[in-house]
DNA sequence: TAAGATAAGAGGGACAT
DNA sequence: ATGTCAGTCTTATCTTA
């Protein structure tokens, strides 16, 4: 553990200015590993290039905690005998304390409470990071995304969102959120299956995270799903090409907003297959896209309303070239 | 046999109370 | 805070071409 604590100093090296307003006046909050622009308020943490294991960020916390509480051993037994100390203003015999001593005791009580807050965070994080490790290895989450998830979790902890709720759900939700942010295709269902918590709770927690932390999720573009589905179905490149063109044209006409992107992708591929004359049944396409037949049909209906004319190969080429 | 239709249920957002 | 409403997506089952 110790050798990794030493590496912490490299953490922030790459950040020099705010990516939005260019200000160099950045405020660091080392407890959450967050960096905020003092000019425009942008959280620039995401810009930080930070490869490595997730508990490097964790050790930031650990370092401050250790500085307060001493050895790692006392960290583990943090609560023993400490919680009832420093109460009242009388000594052991019930005698009133003098002012000097009372002030001293007040300071001690203050420090004691503070260190306990830090300690609670530390313990929470320890449990959370173990869970994070377990889930991400089960889901094959690459390190940078895992790192992102850890960061999100820490921000949630800092904002006191977790008290009274389950750590596991927050870890799972953080991972899902990190995947969305980094455009790593993982279904909420898949993440939930690895977690001890049910999908319902995790999805609720995910939305809580997005709302409370103001996470900015990239809108996932149906076009991104096309190639994956196309390769699963082994359709011709031409078909895939036309599917993309269909989506582009639908997007121009505001036909994609608010719909499940996977359903849109599935419908466009199905449509493209039909136009090229490649035989694929709805069930196949829907399954490859990870959605249902019904959804595919509904999207298909929407596409047909928006795009009454066929998208031929030539038109597809024209649409693509124009971009 | 594939495609379409319909029903029922879950879950969440918007909006009012 | 709680309830209602419209809209989405899912699963299951039935009908149609």
Image (cartoon, coloured by chain):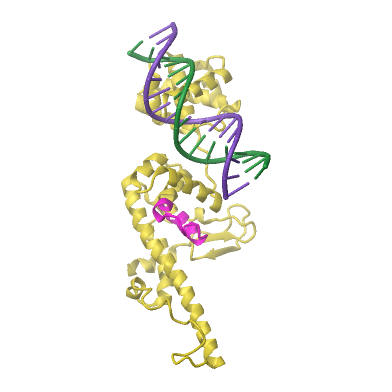
Chain colours: A yellow, B green, C purple
**Measuring 64% from the left and 56% from the top, which residue is drawn there?**
A40
Place of residue A51 in the rendered image (x, y in percent of width and height, measured from the top left): 40, 55
Picture quarter with the C terminus of chain A:
top right
Residue A158 in view, yes or no: yes
In the image, taking residue A202 as reference, residue A211 lies left or right, namely right
User: Does the segment drawn in magenta span residue A155?
Assistant: yes
Residue A241 in view, yes or no: no
Picture quarter with the N terminus of chain A:
bottom left
Q: Is residue A33 above or below residue A197?
A: below
Span colored in magenta: A150-171
Place of residue A25 in the rendered image (x, y in percent of width and height, measured from the top left): 61, 63
| Front position in the image: A66 or A242 | A66
Determine the image quadrant of residue A52. bottom left
Look at the magenta stretch and give its main secondary structure. Answer: helix
User: Does the segment drawn in magenta span residue A62?
Assistant: no
Place of residue A49 in the rendered image (x, y in percent of width and height, measured from the top left): 46, 55
In the image, taking residue A117 as reference, residue A133 lies left or right, namely left
**Measuring 45% from the left and 42% from the top, which residue is drawn there?**
A183
| Front position in the image: A22 or A286 | A286
Q: Is residue A198 above or below residue B4?
A: below
Q: Is residue A88 above or below residue A164?
A: below
| Front position in the image: A53 or A206 | A206
Place of residue A267 in the rendered image (x, y in percent of width and height, measured from the top left): 47, 23
**Measuring 60% from the left and 28% from the top, which residue is drawn there?**
A254
């Amino acid at each position: 553990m110790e050798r990794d604590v030493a590496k912490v100093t490299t953490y922030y090296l790459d950040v020099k200015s705010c990516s939005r307003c260019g200000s160099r006046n950045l405020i660091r909050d080392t407890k959450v590993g967050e960096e905020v622009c003092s000019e425009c308020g942008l959280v620039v943490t995401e810009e930080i290039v930070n490869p490595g294991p997730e508990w490097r960020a964790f050790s930031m916390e650990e370092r401050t905690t250790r500085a307060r509480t001493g050895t790692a051993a006392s960290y583990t037994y943090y609560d023993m005998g400490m919680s009832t100390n420093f109460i009242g203003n009388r000594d052991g015999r019930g005698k009133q304390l003098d002012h000097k001593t009372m002030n001293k005791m007040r300071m001690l009580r203050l420090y004691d409470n503070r260190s306990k807050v830090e300690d609670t965070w530390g313990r929470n994080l320890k449990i959370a990071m173990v869970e994070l490790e377990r889930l991400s290895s089960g889901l094959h989450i690459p390190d940078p995304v895992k790192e992102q998830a850890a960061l999100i979790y820490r921000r949630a902890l800092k904002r006191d969102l977790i008290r009274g709720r389950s750590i596991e759900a927050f870890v799972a939700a953080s991972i899902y959120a990190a995947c969305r942010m980094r455009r790593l295709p993982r279904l909420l269902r898949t993440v939930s299956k690895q977690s001890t918590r049910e999908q319902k709770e995790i999805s609720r927690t995910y939305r809580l995270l997005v709302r409370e932390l103001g996470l900015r999720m990239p809108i996932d573009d149906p076009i991104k799903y096309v190639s994956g589905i196309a390769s699963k179905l082994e359709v011709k490149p031409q078909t895939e090409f036309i599917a993309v063109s269909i989506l582009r044209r639908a997007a121009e006409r505001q036909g994609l907003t608010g719909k499940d992107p996977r359903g849109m992708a599935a419908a466009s591929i199905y449509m493209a297959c039909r136009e090229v004359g490649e035989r694929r049944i709805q069930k196949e396409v829907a399954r490859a896209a990870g959605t249902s037949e019904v959804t595919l049909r509904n999207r298909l209906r929407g596409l047909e309303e928006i795009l009454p004319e066929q998208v031929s190969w030539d038109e597809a080429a024209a649409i693509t070239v124009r971009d």
